[in-house]
Image: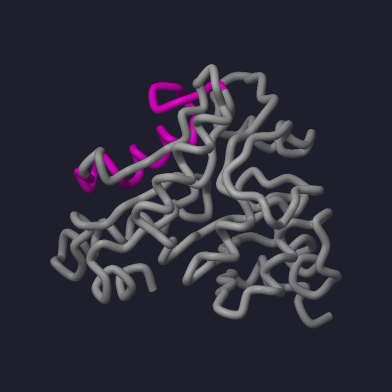
């Protein structure tokens, strides 16, 4: 789907998440690019989110993950990529800079998100206003705990900075991806339960052009 979008619009604006679920996708995208099936050189990219206080040079950061798994292998022009400056003294300005980049090159053609164990998408934690653009906020405790898997040692995580759920609503193709039976329960709640800001991923029930892509494990409780 990403390849088809880029082949239809060479200057597409795409939002990629970091994490385990999209890692396989990046391998396929790189292989397709090397095989001449797609050209990402004219695309623009935004990172979905970041741990406040971290950046490209920090092990475990979202930015480092995406550079390692996609932007560096693909030799993407740095001017075509925007990540949050999560080390900025003025995080409000960092949010405005991201919003401005999306407005300049957007709207988002494809916005891909995962889902947290508490139903967050990006770092939009439970209780996040559906109508927010880029913003920062305290992390839920479960996010802090699960987030440790990206670090070699215990790391203090307190706040996240992220694209907002309003960006997701305005994206031409919003896409949720999830893998593994550990996500089955929260996927069922998000897709078959009530639509509520206490479960941010439930917003996908309101998005007419959205896609949800699951493996068998993540989908095993649907329809029960």
Q: How many marks?
A: 0
Q: Position of residue 163 (x, y in %)?
A: 56, 47
Residue displayed at 31% across by 63% down = 12
Establish if 34 lies above or below 172: above
Q: Quadrant of the N terminus?
A: bottom left
Looking at the image, residue 213 sits to the left or right of residue 144; the answer is left
Tell whether position 63 is magenta: yes
Residue displayed at 68% across by 56% down = 131
Front residue of this view, candidates 170 and 75: 170
Instruction: Write down the region rendered in magenta.
Output: 53-76
- Tell me which corner region of the image, top left, top right, bottom left or bottom right, holds residue 105: bottom left
Looking at the image, residue 120 sits to the left or right of residue 213; the answer is right
Front residue of this view, candidates 33 and 85: 85
Establish if 197 lies above or below 203: above
Q: Quadrant of the C terminus?
A: bottom right
- Tell me which corner region of the image, top left, top right, bottom left or bottom right, holds residue 25: bottom left
Q: Position of residue 116 (x, y in %)?
A: 69, 50
Establish if 91 lies above or below 214: above
Q: Position of residue 2 (x, y in %)?
A: 36, 68
């Amino acid at each position: 789907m990403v390849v088809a979008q880029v082949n239809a619009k060479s200057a597409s604006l795409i939002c990629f998440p970091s994490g385990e679920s999209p890692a396989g996708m990046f391998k396929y995208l790189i292989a397709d690019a090397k095989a001449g099936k797609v050209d990402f050189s004219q695309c623009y990219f935004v990172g979905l989110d970041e741990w406040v206080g971290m950046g490209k040079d920090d092990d475990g950061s979202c930015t480092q993950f995406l550079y390692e798994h996609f932007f560096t292998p693909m030799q993407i022009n740095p001017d075509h990529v925007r990540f949050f400056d999560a080390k900025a003294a003025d995080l409000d300005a960092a949010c405005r800079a991201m919003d401005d980049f999306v407005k300049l090159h957007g709207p988002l053609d494809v916005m891909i998100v995962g889902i947290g164990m508490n139903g967050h998408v990006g770092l939009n934690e439970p209780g996040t206003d559906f109508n927010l653009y880029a913003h920062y906020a305290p992390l839920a405790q479960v996010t802090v705990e699960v987030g440790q898997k990206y670090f070699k040692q215990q790391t203090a995580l307190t706040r996240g900075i992220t694209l907002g759920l309003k960006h997701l609503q305005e994206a031409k193709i919003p896409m949720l991806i999830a893998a593994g039976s550990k996500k089955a329960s929260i996927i069922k709640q998000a897709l078959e339960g009530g639509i509520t800001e206490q479960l941010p991923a439930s917003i996908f029930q309101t998005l007419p052009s959205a896609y949800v892509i699951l493996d068998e494990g993540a989908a095993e409780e649907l329809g029960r």
